[in-house]
Image (cartoon, rainbow, N blue to C red):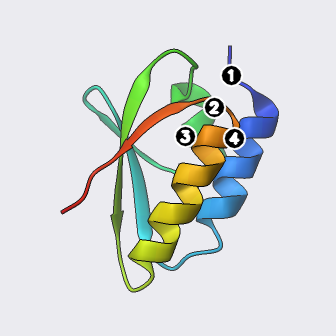
Amino acid sequence: MSNNAAIVDISQTANRFRSSIVLQAENKYIDVKSILGLFTTLVSGHSYELHVHGPDADEAKAAMAEVFAKHNLNIAIVQD
């Protein structure tokens, strides 16, 4: 089941940044700024990888790690 509050929170957090923030779920890539994309993808119990690229990537990674943890979602932030 998707958690609406988590999805809105994650999307709003992502939208504070200029960086591209993409969630990789198996072979799908979802723009985290898209609430619709998150609704169809985000389920608890799965693990995801987050790819962040852009001018404020460091701040975005920290904020996204925090918001995913807050909602008990398992995320690995790819450092590249």
Q: At label 3, which amino acid type do we have? A: Gly
Q: At label 1, which amino acid type do we have? A: Ser
Q: CA distance from mark 4 to mark 2?
A: 18 Å
Q: Is residue 62 visible?
A: yes
User: What secondary structure is found at the residue carrying circle 3?
Assistant: helix
Task: Please name the residue that numbered disc 3 is placed on.
Answer: 37
Sequence-earlier tag: 2 or 1? 1
Q: At label 4, which amino acid type do we have? A: Lys
Q: CA distance from mark 2 to mark 1?
A: 6 Å
Sequence-earlier tag: 3 or 4? 3
Task: Please name the residue that numbered disc 4 is placed on.
Answer: 70
User: What secondary structure is found at the residue carrying circle 1?
Assistant: loop
Task: Please name the residue that numbered disc 2 is placed on.
Answer: 39
Number of the front mark, 1 or 4 = 4
Sequence-earlier tag: 1 or 3? 1
User: What secondary structure is found at the residue carrying circle 4?
Assistant: helix
Q: Quadrant of residue 27?
A: top left
Task: Assess disc 1: are there few (<14), some (14-19) or many (≥20) residues with their C-alpha within 10 Å of its C-alpha.
Answer: few
Residue for point 57% across, 20% down: 43
Above/below status of 66 relative to 37: below
Q: At label 2, which amino acid type do we have? A: Phe
* Whether label 2 touches label 1, CB < 8 Å: yes
**In x, y percent, where is residue 17?**
56, 75
Quadrant, the N terminus? top right
**In x, y percent, where is residue 7?**
69, 40
Above/below status of 28 relative to 59: above
User: What secondary structure is found at the residue carrying circle 2?
Assistant: helix
Task: Assess disc 2: are there few (<14), some (14-19) or many (≥20) residues with their C-alpha within 10 Å of its C-alpha.
Answer: some
Q: CA distance from mark 2 to mark 3?
A: 6 Å
Residue for point 74% across, 49% down: 9
